[in-house]
Image (cartoon, rainbow, N blue to C red):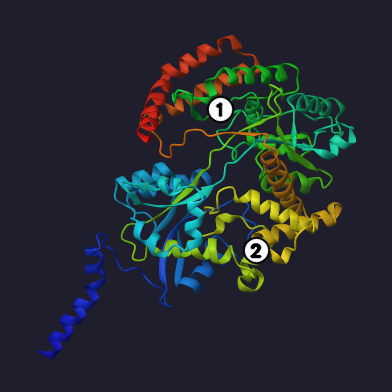
């Protein structure tokens, strides 16, 4: 009888975790473990084509995964590894099958589908219990908007990444060409140039061919022409359209709180008229509309472009290629002043989320995600002695290893922190403050790279120049200075994280119409006298329904 009682007791104890979790409202299953007793957690791993991982490391075996195993007793295993659209397809296949990894990064629409199919865990309680004060402060800096984006029916169903979209859009100009041709730019020193300066510089580059290759272009723009946010503004005309007071690909409200589409305004028509003028004069690439993104990137690397539109970080992943191919290339970023001559700079501030990390419903340890956030974005990010505390990640920082190798390819930083961080790194690099006094390793590391470049510009590593260009020239000088000088006019568009039903039905169609018509307007194939007809067609092909549905969402927020 005693043995029977013991067996019954052992059975009850074995079932206790399942009973307790069921009482808590969400049943979990016991996770698999490895030989060391570590919990095995499967992940959908986003990858990058140029991760810069040191030899011997991979996405499935790297310093981040080893750190998670050491600190948290969790062994991460890739359920799948893919990049870009291939990753999106893998996510879609997993959702369709109902068999998702224990953790993966998804879009807001995918998050909604996962919730509708009851496939992901509610993270409300584990976030409140396990997130560090630093992590909560980061999300708090966005006034709750990022967490709200991941909240469905009052439950936190994912952990969102953060993205700062704090403009202004800018153009990067070959300063070595400017000096060679004795061109005068930004004589008032406000880090912003006029459209006339942009146009005359492009014309001079093209006509006088400073590279001497006979292939120098004035401007080359991607065929989608514009972007709806700062981060994706590379090789687009967004900075130019903003200078006309046009804000394409975003939805805004007028003074009467009526929703309208930024691509369909009179200011946008003026922008297209200007771009058409540049095209007719040969300043804008004669192959506009057919050049691919890769084509334009190759032109930039090969020294055929001296003006490259792009966000503050384009030097880190784009211009650095040109710098590597031609060490003499020196790109300097400028904002573009308003066309009306008021000296202001327009920009869209569209701070949003950068991906949503979900945990499979039923996974035994959902708090593992929060614990990993604490390690990566608090412990490591705020380490004062990273070289000794996290030597492998210190090496990664020196090699500029891509962030995609983290367990989750998201970023997490306070709102507009790049501006403050860049200012601190720049001051330290110039000796105004001590590098050793900087509290965060990442800022210290940037300061050292900037200093290495400033100390020896001609022989510095291209990656040091890239950090100097992005943090000092773009963020500190352009973004910071335009704010300090009070010349920045920030426009806040409507931000709706999920795709509306009307957008699912008609978004692709009206988007294609916009892209095709704008190419025709710029090249002159279609007269800009027909711009109003384009707007009418956009409305009739689904745009009006999108505007109406968006108006309903906005009105409900009031």
Query: Horizontal placement of 105 versus 552: left or right?
Result: right
Locate the C terminus and report the quarter of the image it occupies: top left
Question: Which x, y percent locates residue 264?
Answer: 52, 20
Residue 441: which numbered mark, if any?
Answer: 2
Residue 62 visible in rendering: no
- Which residue corresponds to mark 1? 248
Which residue does the image show at 23% across and 73% down from the upper left? 16
- Is 336 on the left or on the right of 84, as rendered? right
Quadrant position of the N terminus in the picture: bottom left
Nearer-the-camera pick, 452 or 84: 452
In whole angstroms, how far apart are the C-alphas of marks 1 and 2?
Answer: 38 Å
Q: Earlier in the sequence, mark 1 or mark 2?
A: 1
Question: Callout 2 environment at 10 Å: few (<14), some (14 to 19), or many (20+)?
Answer: many
Question: In which quarter of the view is residue 3 placed?
Answer: bottom left
At mark 1, the secondary structure is loop
The percent coordinates of residue 355 (x first, y second) are 48, 48
Residue 320: horizontal and vertical position, in percent? 73, 47
Residue name at image x 32 percent, y 57 percent: 361
- Of 89 and 143, the residue lying toward us: 143
Place of residue 109 in the rendered image (x, y in percent of width and height, measured from the top left): 40, 41
Query: Looking at the image, is 376 positioned above or below residue 99?
Result: below
Asked if residue 487 is positioned above or below residue 17 in the image, the reply reads above
Element type at marker 2? helix
Q: Is residue 269 visible?
A: yes
> Looking at the image, is 231 positioned above or below residue 343?
below
Which residue occupies 84% across, 29% down?
214
Q: Is residue 554 left or right of residue 372?
A: left
Q: Is residue 485 above or below residue 41?
A: above
Q: Residue furthest bottom?
A: 2
């Amino acid at each position: 009888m005693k043995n029977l009682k013991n067996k019954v007791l052992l059975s009850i104890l074995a079932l206790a975790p399942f009973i307790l979790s069921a009482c808590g409202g969400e049943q979990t299953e016991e996770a698999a473990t490895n030989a060391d007793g570590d919990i095995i957690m499967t992940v959908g791993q986003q990858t990058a084509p140029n991760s810069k991982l040191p030899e011997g490391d991979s996405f499935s075996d790297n310093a981040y995964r080893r750190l998670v195993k050491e600190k948290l007793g969790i062994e991460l295993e890739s359920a799948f590894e893919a990049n870009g659209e291939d990753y999106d397809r893998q996510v879609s296949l997993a959702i369709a099958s109902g068999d998702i990894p224990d953790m993966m990064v998804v879009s807001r629409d995918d998050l909604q589908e996962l919730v509708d199919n009851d496939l992901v865990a509610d993270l409300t309680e584990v976030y409140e219990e396990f997130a560090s004060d630093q992590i909560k402060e980061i999300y708090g800096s966005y006034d709750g908007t990022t967490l709200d984006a991941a909240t469905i029916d009052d439950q936190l169903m994912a952990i969102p990444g953060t993205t700062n979209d704090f403009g202004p859009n800018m153009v990067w100009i070959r300063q070595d060409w400017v000096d060679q041709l004795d061109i005068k730019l930004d004589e008032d020193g406000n880090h912003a140039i006029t459209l006339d300066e942009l146009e005359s510089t492009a014309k001079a580059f093209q006509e006088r061919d400073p590279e001497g290759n006979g292939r120098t272009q004035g401007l080359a723009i991607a065929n989608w022409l514009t972007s709806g946010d700062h981060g994706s503004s590379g090789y687009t005309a967004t900075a130019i359209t903003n200078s006309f007071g046009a804000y394409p690909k975003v939805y805004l409200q007028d003074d009467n709180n009526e929703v309208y589409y930024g691509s369909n305004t009179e200011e946008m028509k003026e922008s297209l008229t200007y771009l058409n003028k540049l095209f007719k004069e040969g300043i804008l690439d004669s192959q506009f509309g057919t050049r691919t993104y890769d084509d334009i990137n190759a032109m930039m690397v090969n020294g055929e472009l001296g003006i490259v539109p792009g966000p503050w970080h384009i030097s880190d992943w784009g211009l650095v290629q040109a710098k590597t191919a031609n060490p003499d290339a020196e790109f300097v970023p400028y904002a573009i002043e308003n066309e009306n001559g008021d000296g202001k700079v327009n920009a869209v501030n569209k701070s949003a989320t950068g991906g949503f990390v979900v945990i499979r419903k039923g996974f035994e340890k959902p708090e593992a995600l929060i614990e990993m956030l604490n390690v990566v974005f608090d412990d490591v990010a705020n380490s004062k002695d990273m070289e000794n505390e996290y030597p492998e990640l210190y090496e990664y920082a020196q090699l500029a290893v891509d962030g995609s190798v983290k367990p989750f390819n998201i970023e997490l930083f306070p709102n507009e922190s790049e501006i403050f961080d860049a200012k601190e790194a720049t001051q330290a690099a110039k000796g105004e403050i001590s590098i050793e006094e900087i509290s965060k390793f990442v800022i210290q590391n940037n300061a050292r790279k900037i200093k290495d470049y400033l100390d020896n510009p001609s022989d510095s590593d291209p990656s040091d120049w890239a950090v100097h260009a992005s943090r000092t020239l773009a963020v500190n000088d352009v973004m910071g200075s335009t704010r300090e000088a009070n010349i920045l006019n920030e426009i806040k568009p409507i931000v709706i994280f999920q795709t509306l039903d009307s957008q699912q039905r008609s978004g692709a169609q009206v988007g294609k119409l916009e892209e095709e018509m704008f190419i025709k307007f710029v090249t002159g194939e279609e007269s800009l006298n027909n711009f109003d007809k384009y707007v009418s067609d956009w409305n009739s092909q689904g745009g009006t329904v999108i505007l109406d549905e968006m108006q309903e969402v906005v009105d409900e927020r009031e």
